[in-house]
Amino acid sequence: MNKLIERVKVTERKEKPDPSSLGFGQYFTDYMFVMDYEEGKGWHRPRIAPYEPVTLAPSASVFHYGQAVFEGLKAYRAADDRILLFRPDQNIKRLNRSCRRMSMPSLDEDVVLEALTQLIDLEKEWVPRERGTSLYIRPFVIATEPCLGVRPSKSYTFMIVLSPVGSYYSSQLEPAKIYVEDEYVRAVNGGVGNAKTSGNYAASLQAQQKANELGYDQVLWLDAIEKKYVEEVGSMNIFFVINGEVVTPALSGSILSGITRASVIDLLRSWNIHVREERISIEEIYDASVRGDITEIFGTGTAAVITPVDELNWHGKKLSINDGQIGRIAEKLHQTLTDIQLGKEQDAFHWVVEV
Amino acid sequence: MNKLIERVKVTERKEKPDPSSLGFGQYFTDYMFVMDYEEGKGWHRPRIAPYEPVTLAPSASVFHYGQAVFEGLKAYRAADDRILLFRPDQNIKRLNRSCRRMSMPSLDEDVVLEALTQLIDLEKEWVPRERGTSLYIRPFVIATEPCLGVRPSKSYTFMIVLSPVGSYYSSQLEPAKIYVEDEYVRAVNGGVGNAKTSGNYAASLQAQQKANELGYDQVLWLDAIEKKYVEEVGSMNIFFVINGEVVTPALSGSILSGITRASVIDLLRSWNIHVREERISIEEIYDASVRGDITEIFGTGTAAVITPVDELNWHGKKLSINDGQIGRIAEKLHQTLTDIQLGKEQDAFHWVVEV
């Protein structure tokens, strides 16, 4: 594989952006990884190329019929300058599950990991040092065949781009206000809710805008069928701490299988905190909160890491969670996860991979 | 507006493809229409440009978060060489409805119609003459902002491309075999099923492939909630002729509001055939078919025009419709619609617009 990745050198390295104003997904590094697929030929020509525009026919399938899947993970700089990845194998496996659901060709997982590693190794200088920053890694596959027939494309491009980022929200561990959406829905069983595909995000924007206009940060989606059961938040999975136990919606088929979600469950269990993955209705949550049984609500995600929720609005009924304070479990999870990701904490689960 | 559309000339006209092997959406004409949108600036720089690749940042929003909507309509060449469009105003209105649902900026409908007309006028030679052929028109809008934050893009491109096409299926009025899908779903109320957005098509491919492997041409979707009520077929709306009445699923919010569908309803009613738009279960269809009450099933769509259905497979139960023969109503609708589109029949509804 080493020899297989062709490299074209950039003539000049870009200037690195100011680490205090990185934002999210606005700056990109000097290089990207690219690989092509053609029916009959398979995936071919893996290469590290200068970060540059993509040129596609106006009839390219991705513009019309939306075959597009992606992943998101981060590279962290440890205190000793090692560059660390968090569970990249899980992202690569999920990328392939998304590909299969969207009738797109799957990728050789070893090739993707190797590509990721080589690209990040080349771009190590771009991994920022400041607290809360990281190098966001965006692998994605798009359908490129220039034909308007509605059928799976016969050609694709796989790319990995890298973006130095601050924290996704304006500050670390700032609590979020969540609006429970009961008009729009995100996904339904039998649909593509458990694939990380572009259309799911486009479908979520209208509700997200509505929530923002009402002064909320994110939307909590309910199930599409009964509009009763909690599914996930815009860009996070959701957890509730009820009477000292942690409850999170079971992966129903319409929920994204979050890697931070899985890691949080493992961590909690290792601390002997009981975690239940089950169907939870919003009404149960409301009632438990009114009774004072809910001590914390938090979201989990690669971009969000751990985000405490301090207010939930359901049908105009506002629940204030833990008096707007960050909960003990969310705080400990955030600390532990970021310490593992930064190589400060012993990595008992073998989640971290050094580049 | 006339002056507003800037034109860049192609240096050389392409050779026209053989009209007998056009297929669908494979060849494109010499020119396209392009217009840009930027937040704060609105839609600007409408232009007719040579048909050429689109250049986008790898981080362009359409690749990641799928904001993409489109339309499809056709220009027909009348016997007297006039170029005719069929209800373009309806496509433009639907394009704007799709834009609004997907949090994309809507377009000035007059500007789009003018752009369409000027482009087709310039490309008239490309409208083929042969029976069953036409110039397919694909207006579409894609999100172009180079940023990975999940929110509506701040910039977009609107394009119109033109493709000379044969009939969508291999031959005119060849009956299709339909597989009733009861595992995968296309859309759900509260979702984006009634928007013509790329993600709906990507979400349909897996079921379409399954149907193809089983020897069927297209999928008939059931409602996502009870998997009981008929919604639509892959690229068509669906109609049933039951005891001399015509029944089609009511627009429920998850069904695409087809322009051919609406036109067919108007035509049937003008012939004093009773049309009911209502919720119809697949079980009712099955029972009616077993009783011999169903004389025809057909699909309607811009690409498909009128496509008779000669077999329906529901849970392995196969229904043969009208002994595999094309029904009288489907045939008459096809003849009348294509005659109106080609300017052969009096256009009582004022559907046809001359370019």
Image: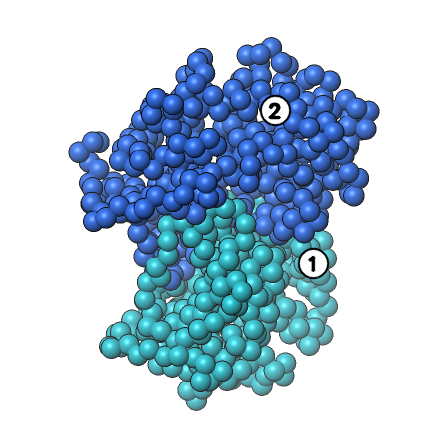
Chain colours: A cyan, B blue
Residue type at mark 2? Ala
Residue B224 image position (x, y, % from top left): 66, 41
**Residue B116 figure quarter:** top left
Circle 1 — which element?
A: loop
Q: Which mark is residue A258?
A: none
Front residue (pair A17, A36): A36
In the figure, B2 relative to A224: above or below?
A: above
Residue at 55% x, 37% y is: B171
Front residue (pair B132, A54): B132
**Residue A269 figure quarter:** bottom right
Residue A305 image position (x, y, % from top left): 52, 67
Residue at 53% x, 22% y is: B335
**Residue on which the image places disc 1:** A250
In the figure, B196 relative to A245: above or below?
A: above
**Residue on which the image places disc 2:** B330
Q: Residues within 10 Å of mark 1 (few under 14, many from 20)?
A: some
Decide if residue A152 is in sight here. yes
Say whether residue A321 is left or right of residue A292: left
Decide if residue B154 is in sight here. no
